[in-house]
Each structure stands twice: as structure tokens, then as C-alpha cells.
Image (cartoon, rainbow, N blue to C red):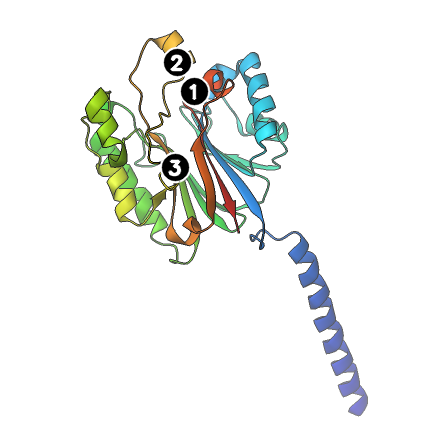
Amino acid sequence: MRINLLKYYSMLITIVLLSWILAGCNDSTSITPEPGQKVKVLSYNVWIGFQEQDSLILSKYTDWVNRLDPDIIAYQELNHYTQEDLEELADEYSHPFAIQSKEEGYPVALSSKFPIVNFQRVLDNMHHGYIYGVTNNIHVFVIHFTPFGKRGLKKRQEEVETILAHAGLLPDDEMVMILGDFNAPSPSDSSYYLEHGPDYGDEDYSVIVAMEEAGFRDVYNMFHDDFKKSIPTPTRVEQVGTRDANRIDFAFVNSALAEYVVHADIIHDEYTDIISDHYPVYFELEF
């Protein structure tokens, strides 16, 4: 009996030691943010799949995005892309993980340097659909709400209610971001709209108000008081004609994640003037 006990305790010690070793290995490839870790996030409506995968535009984009080197990218309007196409695009900027909502219509997509787990596609009762996944221990929702100005308002109100209901299932201390093209204006920009009278200027602000009342913060507003358009770019004006400036692309974070946001902007430069009709929303986290 004593020999059996010795064998048992020896085996138990071995299991504990192996657990410690494996735990150490897991720490080195952890998908949980580590102290001091910086995470760069990009949300981009890429206008009908980089205008139907135009090779010149794609070349400019891959050059630009490699220099920016984001860790997480949320896409809208990834038209004409298959899952395989998305994976090939993500490989161009060293994102080994990428998933999209669908392969027809106006897909949204998510790519990341970190594994994407618990992934869900939600298409029912949504105009374009949305995706949800967890990457680097951050819950990410990529959305693209219905367009059509005032005519689409009721649908956008329903869509934001659905997103917030889904996000509401998560514990309050979990880190959450909701990114994409909301096709809706923010009340924080109301003074600009009143002065300039653009398309969205006299529209209801309830979609963005719903986000804010649910406790989500607009990352751009965390660092800027001024209005900065997210649409149109010069390319849009040239191809489609003039259109009033609007800010309808947003990145929202909940209170558990907001404390880690250290920088945010809507990027206007010589590349983003050309790549799409929208400008991308960009922000950085430091844990």
C-alpha cells in the first residue's frame, strides 16, 4: 500500500509540474491583453470591395495598411470577396485570422493578428448583417446598418436595438467594441450639421443616442471636439458627384475598454483620399 501511495504522489507531482509548464507555454501565446501591450484597431468601409478589387487600389491599400500595421481590422462593403479572397488579402498584411459574414451582397468582415473565437454571423432581421467574435479577449461587433437616409431610419433603430441586446448579454466587466458604418449622424456633430445642412443634418440622432445611453463611448469624441467627416473622399466626389460631408462611421467602446484607449482619429491622407469613398476610423489601446 505504501508503494502505491508513493507512486500516486509521484504521479500527482508530475501532473502538477506539467500543468505549470503548459501554463507557462500558454502565457507566451496568450490571447489575453498583457500589461504594456498596445493594440491598434482599424474600421474601414472599403466601397464595393475596393471598387470591385481594383488592382491599383488594392496595391495602395496593402502598402498603406502595412505601414499602419493594425492588429484588428473591421471591414464593411467587402463585396465580391469569398472567404478565401479575404484570407489572401489578410495575408498581405500579416493577419493569420480572418472571417467574413457572407459572400454576397454587402459583407462585413474581421481580420486579426490574434485568434478569433466564438464567432457568430447574424443575418436575419438585419439589412447587411453583422458579425461578432472575440479576439485578444476583446468582444468585437462589426456592423453595417441600413442606408437610405430618413427612409432607413426605422430599420437602423431596430438594428442598433439588436446589437445592444446582443452586447447586453455580456458581463459588464468584459471589454467590448462595436465598429462600422452606422449610416447615422451623431448629436455631437449637430452644430456642424445645423450650419452646413448636409444630407444627415436634419435626421433623427436616435441611433447614436441609443449607443451612448447604453454606456458606449465614441472613441473619436474622446480625443476631439471638432467635426471631421468620414465621407465623402475626393474620389467619391469625382466619381459620383458632390455630396455633403458627414460622420457616419464610428468605433464605440464600453466602459471596461474605454480606459485603455490612448488615441483615436479618422484618417485623412493621400492614400485614404483614394482607397474608398469613406475614411477609416482608427484607434489605439494600451493595456
Disc 3 residue crowd, few under 14, some 14–19, many 20+, Cα 10 Å: many
* Nearer-the-camera pick, 146 or 275: 275
Q: Where is residue 153 in the image (x, y as percent from the top left)?
A: 22, 30
Find out whether the residues at labels 1 and 2 contact each other: C-beta distance under 8 Å. yes
Q: What element carries label 2?
A: helix
Q: In the rendering, which numbered label is found on residue 47?
A: 1
Determine the residue located farthest toward the bottom in the rendered image. Answer: 1
The three-letter amino acid code for the residue at tag 3 is: Tyr
In-image side of 154 versus 1 (left or right): left
Q: Residue at x 76, y 73 (%)?
A: 14
Residue 269, image x and y in percent?
49, 21
Taking the view exactly as shown, the residue that stands out farthest to the right is: 3
Callout 1: SS? helix
Name which residue type carries label 1: Trp
Residue to which mark 2 is pinned: 236
* Precedes in sequence: disc 1 or disc 3: 1
Q: Nearer the viewer, mark 2 or mark 3?
A: 3
Checking the image for residue 196, the label placed there is none
Q: Which of marks 2 and 3 is nearer the N terminus?
A: 3
Tell which tag, 1 or 2, sits nearer the viewer: 2
Q: Distance between the residues labelled 2 and 3?
A: 23 Å
Q: To which residue does mark 3 refer?
A: 220
Instruction: Say whether residue 29 is left or right of residue 197.
Output: right
C-alpha separation, residue under disc 1 versus residue under disc 2: 9 Å
